[in-house]
Image (spheres, rainbow, N blue to C red):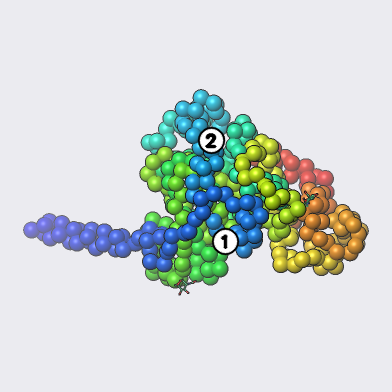
Amino acid sequence: MAELRLLYVMYLVFILFAFSLAQLLPLGKHTENGQHMKYISTFPTTTSFYNDFVKPEIPLLMKNVLTNANFPILKDWTDEYLCDKYGNLHVRVEQDKKEDRSLKPKHYNFKKFLESYVTDNIYMVQSVPNEMKGEVTVPSLFNCGGFQKVLQDSVLWLSSGNTRSVLHFDDMDNINCVLDGQKVVLLFNKAQKELIEADGFNKEGSYSKVDVDAVNLDEFPKLRLANWSTAVLDRGDCLYIPHGWYHQFRSNNARNLAINFWFSHLWWLNESNCDSTQVTSHTHTLEQMAVKSNNEQVRSKLLSKWAHKKIVSNKEFIAEIPKFDAESRFQVLDMIDSNHDGNLSWNELYSFDIGDYVLQTLTGTTMKQLETCENSQYQYSDYDAKHEKYARYMQDM
Ligand SMILES: *[C@@H]1O[C@H](CO)[C@@H](O)[C@H](O)[C@H]1NC(C)=O
Ligand SMILES: *[C@@H]1O[C@H](CO)[C@@H](O)[C@H](O)[C@H]1NC(C)=O
C-alpha cells in the first residue's frame, strides 16, 4: 500500500515536471511577436544593396538567388564529391548540434567526418580551406564599390540537420547562403539591445544565455517584449544580416550545407567603382578575392565614428585616434591625407594602407585588442600562420 502511494506521488511529480517543461517553448514560439520577412528573388546591384540595406543596416532575404544564378557549388557539392576531392583535409567539428560555447571543437579528417555525421551529434563549422577556394564563387554583390576588399572570412556549415545556434550578434556584416536543406533564422533588430541583453547575456561572447529550445520567460522577462522577423532559407537562398543584429539559426532535419561570407561593415560605397551596367554574375572566386586579414575590421571600427559625415577634418581625426606623439601624428596624416588639403575624404579614408596604419599607430595594448577581434575562431589551418604574423608585428614595434 505504501509502495503504491509512493508510486502515485512519483507519478504526480513527473506529471507536474513534464507540464512545467511543456510551458517552455522554443525561441520563435515563445511569444507571438514574430513576422515573416519579405524577400526578393534576384540579387540587387551592389549600389542598391548598399544604399537600401547595408547603409541603413536592414536585413535582406534573397530567395532562389543561387538557383537563378546557376551558382556552381549548389549542385556539385554532394558528400561523394566532397569526399573524393577533399577527403584528406582536416576540418573543425563542433561536438553538439545545439551550440554550446563551452564545448571545445575537435578536428576531424574530412572523410571521417563525412562517414559519421549522419548519425553522430556533430557539426562541421570550418573556414573554406584554401584547397576549396577556387571552386567557391562569391555573390556578385561583392564585385565592386569597396566590397571586394572587406571580405573577412567564409565558412562552411555542414550537418545532418536539427542544429540550433545561440541567440547572438556578430561584429561583421554577414551573407549566409543555404546550399542544401533549410535554415530558419530569427532576426531581432539591434535597436532592441536593452530587451535582449537585459537578462542573462554573455557580453564577451555577444550571446544570450537563453535556452533556445525552452525559453523561460520568468528568467528572461524582457524577451517577452522583443519583436523579430523570421527568414526561411531553402536551398539556393541567401540572407544578409547587418552587424549587430541579434539572430538565431536552426536547421531542419535533413542534410544541411551552408556557406557564409563575413565582411567588415562599409561606411562608404565607392560608387565610381560600380558602373551602372554592372554585371550581376558571380565572376570572382574566393581564391581571387583573397580573404583579408582582420585589418579591414580595424579600419571599419575606426571609421564608424564618422559614419554620418561627408568629410572628416585632420583635426577631428587626430582627436579620435589612440595615443600619439607629434611625430607619428604627422606620419599618419601624411599617409592618409594624400592630397594634403587638411581634410580626409572617404576615398582617402578607404585608400590608405590599413596594414601600415596598424603598424604605425597601435601600441602594445591595442595590439591585444586587435588579436581578440581577429576572426580566428573558425580557422584551423590558418591559425598558426596568423599567430606567427602577429607575433612578428609585436616584435617589429
Ligand atoms: C513590437 O511590435 C509591436 C506591434 O507592432 C509594437 O507595438 C511594439 O512597440 C514593438 N516593440 C518593440 C520593442 O519594438
Ligand atoms: C574608387 O573607385 C575609383 C574608380 O574605380 C578608383 O580609382 C579608386 O581608387 C577607388 N577608391 C578606393 C578607395 O578604392
Please give left or right for residue 326 compared with residue 190 in the image: right
- Given residues 155 and 48, the one toward you in this image is 48
Q: CA distance from mark 1 to mark 2?
A: 28 Å
In the image, residue 133 above or below residue 216: above
Q: Which residue is tagged 2?
A: 73
Identify residue type, mark 1. Answer: Ile
Identity of the residue furthest to the left in this view: 1
Identify residue type, mark 2. Answer: Ile
Please give left or right for residue 191 compared with residue 383 in the image: left
Q: Residue at x 55, y 38 (%)?
A: 71
Percent x, y of residue 154: 60, 43
Q: Residue at x 53, y 35 (%)?
A: 73
Q: Residue at x 51, y 42 (%)?
A: 68
Q: Secondary structure at mark 1?
A: loop
Percent x, y of residue 94: 49, 42
* Image-quadrant location for residue 173: bottom right
Percent x, y of residue 378: 58, 43
In terms of sequence position, does the residue under pointer 1 or pointer 2 come before the other?
Answer: 1
In the image, residue 283 above or below residue 22: above
Q: Secondary structure at mark 2?
A: helix
- Given residues 227 and 89, the one toward you in this image is 227
Quadrant in which the N terminus appears: bottom left
Q: Residue at x 50, y 32 (%)?
A: 76
- Given residues 48 and 300, the one toward you in this image is 48
Residue 58 image label: 1
Q: Residues within 10 Å of mark 1 (few under 14, many from 20)?
A: some
- Given residues 94 and 27, the one toward you in this image is 27
Identity of the residue furthest to the top in this view: 84
